[in-house]
Image (cartoon, helix red, strand yellow):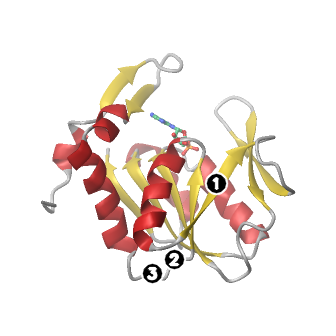
Amino acid sequence: MMTTDPTHLAAKIREIPDFPKPGVVFKDITPLMQDPQAFREVIDRVVEHFKGARIDQVLGIESRGFIFGAAIAYALGAGFVPVRKAGKLPAPTHSCEYALEYGTDVLEIHCDAVRPGERVLIIDDVLATGGTAAAVLELVRKLEGEVAGFSFLIELSFLSGRDKLQGHETYSVLRY
Ligand code: AMP
C-alpha cells in the first residue's frame, strides 16, 4: 500500500560518511533496492507522477539511473535510453562535458537515441548540484527532444540542483 508520506523510505537509505572522499555523506540506496516493497513503491510513485505525461523515452543516467529508469520505462510503456560515461556507447554519439567539484566529466548519448519531438523523462538516483542532470538536458536539446521532466529518488535541496533545471517538471521522492 502506498501512503502519501514517503519518509519510511528514508529509513532504507544508508548514509556513508566520507565516501568516496572526505566531507561527502554518500547516500547508499542498496538497502532500499534490496527491499521488495520499498523498491516497488519508489517506482510506483514516479510512474504515478508522470503517467499522464505522454513519455516516449526514459533516459537513465549511468549507472544507478539505469536501475530505476528501466523499471520506470517498463511501467510507463516507454522506451529506455542509456546516458553513459565517455567511451562506453558503441554507435555514433553526442557528448557533453560538465563540471565536477574538481575537474570535468563527459556524458554521451547515441545520436539516434531520441527522435526530434519525442518526450523524454530523465532519471537518476540523486540530484546534488544538478551538474549531471543539466548535462543530460543539453544532450536532449542536441537531439531536439522535448524534456517532459526529471525524476530522482533523492534530492539534496541544500545544494540547489533544482535551480539548474528551471522550467522543467522535477519530481523527487525524498528531499533532504
Ligand atoms: P550532481 O551532478 O552534483 O547533481 O551529482 C549527481 C550525481 O552524483 C548522481 O549521479 C549521483 O549518483 C551522484 N551523487 C552526488 N552526490 C551524491 C551523494 N551524496 N550520495 C550518492 N550519490 C551522489
**Residue 53: assigned label:** 3
Locate the C terminus by quadrant: top left
Local secondary structure at mark 1: strand
Instruction: Please provide percent x and percent y for residue 139.
Output: 73, 62
Q: Is disc 3's CB within 8 Å of ligand 1?
A: no
Task: Give amino acid for label 2.
Answer: Ile
Task: Give amino acid for label 3.
Answer: Ala
Which residue corresponds to mark 2? 55
* Residue 1: quadrant of the picture: bottom left
Q: Which of 165 and 73 is in front in this view?
A: 73
Task: Give amino acid for label 1.
Answer: Pro
Local secondary structure at mark 3: loop
Task: Give me the C-alpha separation between circle 2 and circle 3.
Answer: 6 Å
**Mark 1 or mark 3, which has the lower sequence index?**
3
Q: Do the residues labelled 1 and 3 touch (CB within 8 Å)?
A: no
Which residue corresponds to mark 1? 82
